[in-house]
Image: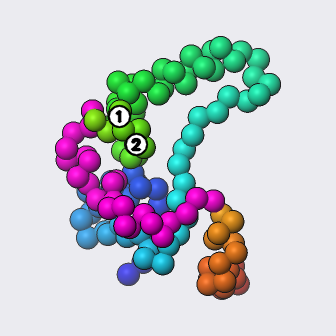
């Protein structure tokens, strides 16, 4: 047996290719993250940045990106356009109760005593 961290879309692809590989969210919790777009405050061409963001966030475009890279979408407008089999994939869209123990940001990860001990053991190995 082995364990690793991976992005959700990679976990779904691995499970699709090798069904014996399971993708599991730890019941104790863990860190969750999401990609985001940003325009630097000193960007030389902010209108172009906004135009790009508007394009990428268009549901018709975003659904194509989702289907190409497999990462789940947090945009309900995009989810309405996805095939049922994608939305029913528990790796990409786990039940809400499985997401409850997860948190954004490393601060909780670094301040939790159990996780701090685990990280110390990992670093000393």
Q: Around disc 2, counting alpha carbons within 10 Å, would you say few (fewer than 14), some (14 to 19), or many (20 or more)?
A: some
User: Percent from the top left, x then y, of residue 2?
Assistant: 42, 78
Residue 122 visible within the image: no
The image quadrant of residue 14 is: bottom left
Pick out the residue farthest to the right: 42
CB contact under 8 Å: marks 2 and 1:
yes
Membership of 92 in magenta stretch = yes
User: Percent from the top left, x then y, of residue 73?
Assistant: 40, 42
Q: Is 113 located above or below residue 9 in the figure?
A: below
- The residue wearing badge 1 is 78
Q: CA distance from mark 2 to mark 1?
A: 7 Å
User: Percent from the top left, x then y, of residue 103?
Assistant: 55, 63
Instruction: Give the residue displayed 26% in from the left and 70% down from the top.
Output: 20
Regarding mark 2 in the picture, which secondary structure is present there?
loop
- The residue wearing badge 2 is 73
Q: Which residues are magenta?
A: 81-105
Q: Could you tell which of marks 2 and 1 lies nearer the N-terminus?
A: 2
Instruction: Give the residue displayed 47% in from the left and 61% down from the top.
Output: 6
């Amino acid at each position: 047996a082995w364990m690793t961290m991976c992005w959700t879309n990679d976990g779904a692809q691995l499970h699709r290719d090798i069904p014996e590989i399971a993708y599991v969210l730890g019941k104790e919790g863990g860190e969750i993250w999401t990609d985001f777009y940003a325009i630097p405050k000193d960007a030389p061409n902010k209108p172009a940045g906004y135009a790009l963001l508007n394009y990428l966030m268009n549901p018709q475009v975003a659904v194509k990106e989702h289907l190409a890279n497999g990462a789940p979408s947090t945009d309900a407008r995009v989810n309405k356009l996805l095939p049922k089999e994608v939305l029913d994939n528990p790796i990409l869209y786990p039940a809400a109760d499985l997401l409850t123990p997860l948190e954004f940001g490393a601060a909780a990860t670094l301040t939790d005593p159990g996780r701090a001990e685990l990280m110390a053991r990992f670093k000393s190995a």
